[in-house]
Amino acid sequence: MTAASVATHVLTGREYLRVSQDNSGHQRSVTEQHDDNARTAERHNITITGTPYVDNDRSASRYASNARDDWARLVADLESGAFIEDVLILWEYSPEQP
């Protein structure tokens, strides 16, 4: 690749979207995560491709009783090489501590 082609190279990215509780039942939070990811990806010249991995209304706690099926699928895809995008796009919310 030339320097010019590197500067214009578009990376591909695939999302993992998760929210612990979805009381609305409308996946509002994962939709907001995707919207935020899309804005950030555009700023970094990343094209979001593929169907996102989504664990809606699933806790990430080690004490959670419901499995995160898409997390397991993502890990399996990463380990097997089935994940072909350049980057994995994750969204983290860290609430302010008192």
Image (cartoon, rainbow, N blue to C red):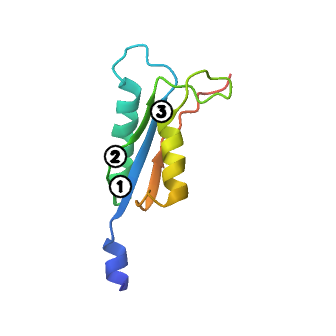
* Position of 78 relative to 54 (above/below): below
Point out the image quarter for the C terminus. Answer: top right
Residue at disc 3, secondary structure: strand
Disc 3 marks a residue whose amino acid type is: Arg
State yes or no: discs 1 and 2 in contact (Cβ < 8 Å). yes
Around disc 1, counting alpha carbons within 10 Å, would you say few (fewer than 14), some (14 to 19), or many (20 or more)? Answer: few
Tell me where residue 37 appears, x and y as whole percent: 39, 44
Tell me where residue 6 appears, x and y as whole percent: 37, 77
Marks 3/1: CA distance? 22 Å
The residue that label 3 is drawn on is 18
Residue 59 appears left or right of 91: right
Q: Upstream in the sequence, badge 3 or badge 1?
A: 3
Residue 60 appears left or right of 4: right
Residue at disc 1, secondary structure: helix
Per the rendering, the mark at residue 43 is 1
Disc 2 marks a residue whose amino acid type is: Arg
